[in-house]
Amino acid sequence: MKTFSLISEMVKAVQKEHKAGHSIGFVPTMGALHEGHLSLMEESKKANDITVCSIFVNPIQFNNKKDLEKYPRNLKEDLRLLQSAGCDYVFIPENEEVYPEGTPRLDINFGSLDKVMEGKFRPGHFKGVAIIVKKLFEIITPDHAYFGKKDYQQLLIIRHLVSVLQLPVQIHASPTFREPDGLAMSSRNLRLTIGEREMASLIYQTLCKVKEKAGHLPVKELRRWAIKKISSNPAFTVEYFEIVDKNDLHILENWKEKENALACTAVFLGDVRLIDNMELFS
C-alpha cells in the first residue's frame, strides 16, 4: 500500500495504472474508518484492478465549526485498517494542497435535492461535498466510486453532479452497515458516551416501527408518531423526520407513491448529530 499527500504524486500514480489498462475503484472518506468503509473497499476490490481510498476531513462541508473541530481523527488506525483490507493507494492531502487558493466556485443547480433535510439544516454542506467530490474525481480519475446509503441525500447529490458534469465515473451505492443493535455505523459514533451509545439504537428501532406502520397510518400521522417516539427519551432532540420519495426527496403526502417511500431522520444525542434512513416498502 502506497500513501500520497501531494496531488501531483497521486495523479502520476493513477495515470500509470490507467496506461497499464487497469480499472480504478475509489472510496472517498473522512477517516475514522469503520466496517462500513471497509465493506466499500471490499466492493471496489472485487470489481477493479486497483483500489484507492482518500482520507480528508473536508472543512468546507462543515457549517458548524465545533463539529469540524470534534470530528474524530485516527490516521494511524485508519492506515492499519486499509493495509489489512488490501488497499492499493491512499490519498491523504492537507487543506492547503486541496484548496491552495481558497474555496473554489461550483455553479450547479441541484434543484430541490439540496434544499430539504440535510440541505435545510446544514446550509452550504452539499456545496462543500460537491466541490470536494468533483476535485477528488479529477485527481483520482476513477472508473467506479463507492458510497454508502446511510448518507442517502449525499448519494443523490453526487449522482446529480456526475450526471450534470458528465463525469466518466460509475457511482455504486451499498446498503447501510449497522452495529449489532441496529445503529447505523458512523465515524461520529465514536463521540458518543457509553450511556449515549446504549440509547442510540432507539433511532433504528423507531425506523423499524415506522416500516411496520407504513401504509396503515396516514403519512403525516406516522411522521408525528416517529418524532414523539424518539423525543420520548429526553437525551434525544429530533432535527427532522421526513418520509420522502427516494428518487427526488419530495415529501410524501400520502401512500400513493409508497413503492419509493424512504424515511429519513437526523437527531442529536447529546451534542452528537446522527442520521439514518430506511426504505419502507422494500
Image (spheres, rainbow, N blue to C red):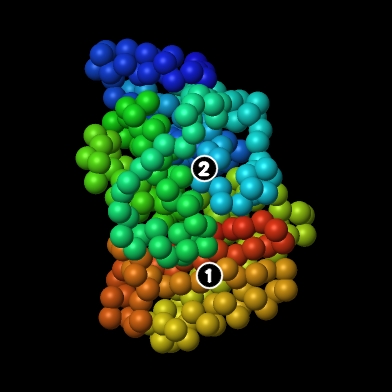
Amino acid type indicated by mark 1? Tyr
Residue closest to the eye, 54 or 136: 136
Figure quadrant of residue 73: top right
For label 2, the residue is 60
Figure quadrant of residue 215: bottom left
Q: Residue at x 55, y 55 (%)?
A: 184
Q: In this view, does 218 lie above or below 202?
A: below
Q: Residue furthest front?
A: 101
| Residue 42 in view (yes/no) | no
Q: Residue at x 49, y 33 (%)?
A: 102
Figure quadrant of residue 236: bottom right
Residues packed near mark 1 inside 10 Å, few (<14), some (14 to 19) or many (20 plus): some
For label 1, the residue is 240
User: As drawn, is 112 to the left or to the right of 74?
Assistant: left
Which x, y percent locates residue 262?
40, 67
Q: Residue furthest left?
A: 166
Residue closest to the eye, 233 or 268: 268
Secondary structure of residue under mark 2: helix
Q: Is residue 260 above or below residue 72?
A: below
Q: Is residue 85 above or below residue 229?
A: above
Secondary structure of residue under mark 1: strand
| Residue 65 in view (yes/no) | yes
Residues packed near mark 2 inside 10 Å, few (<14), some (14 to 19) or many (20 plus): many
Q: Cα distance, mark 1 to mark 2?
A: 23 Å
